[in-house]
Image (cartoon, grey):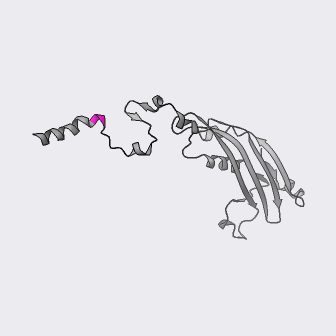
Amino acid sequence: MMKWSIVQLQKFKKNGIQFDKTVPFDHLKERDHQIRSISPIRIVGNVDLDSKKVTFHLHITGEMVLPSSRTLRDVHFPIDIRTTEIFVQDSTGEDWEEQENIHPIQGEMIDLTPIIEELILIEIPIQVYNEKDDQIPTEQKKGVDWEFIQDPDRLNEKRVDPRLADLANFFHQEKDE
């Protein structure tokens, strides 16, 4: 998918490499079951090479469909990631450990696929909301012993739980006697 050999990259050392690929990442649905669908991911970037490192400047775009945290309806969540990933031959000579996005080159190939997968999975928010969820008719915002409240004034209201209403009356009766 997104693999280059070191020999292949060395051929373009002088001018660098530019690429624009669209790659399917449907297999991410198996890694995170929250992903209902994912569009093919477009990866645009360029590669800079020098004697110690290979630097990938990436722009990753696409779209995932995730469940709304409130209603479980589909929410189309855009993916738009800009990152710089650096691969180094020998990480012992420099202070590479202190820098982010540094990866050791293992073997003769550089594979961006696992890095792109992780970047996409990290983008998934803990809670996903759809603007249409706030426009749900009032009758769909209530159920047995529950109600979805958006009005801040109503959130602070003191209400008695209907299951404890008789208990509240018990203390009033005791004072009257």
Q: Quadrant of the N terminus?
A: top right
> Residue 134: percent from the left, percent from the top?
53, 37
Q: Residue at coordinates 81% horizontally, 54% vertically from top-left?
A: 46
Residue 158, picture quadrant: top left
Question: Which image quarter: residue 176?
Answer: top left
Per the rendered image, the range of residues in magenta is 159-163
**Is there any visible trace of residue 112 in the rendered image?**
no
Q: Quadrant of the C terminus?
A: top left
- In the drawing, does residue 54 fall left or right of residue 137? right
Q: Tally the marks.
A: 0
Q: In the image, what residue occupies the spot 79% across and 66% down?
A: 52
Position of residue 113 in the picture relative to residue 14 (left or right): left
Query: Please, is residue 127 above or below residue 163 in the view?
Result: below
Query: Residue 32 is drawn in which quadrant?
Result: top right
Residue 53, horizontal then vertical, whole percent? 78, 63
The answer to whether residue 9 is magenta is no
Relative height, residue 166 to residue 121 (above, below): above
Q: Is residue 97 above or below residue 67?
A: below
Horizontal and vertical percent for residue 60? 73, 48
Q: In this rendered view, identify the residue nearer to me: 63 or 149.
A: 149
Residue at 40% over, 34% down: 146
Outermost residue toward the front in this view: 153
Decide if residue 40 is in sight here. Answer: yes
Tell me residue 93's x, y (percent). 73, 71
**Residue visible at 69% across and 59% down?**
101
Q: Main secondary structure of the magenta part?
A: loop
Please name whichever residue, 89 or 68, is drawn nearer the observer in this view of the structure: 68
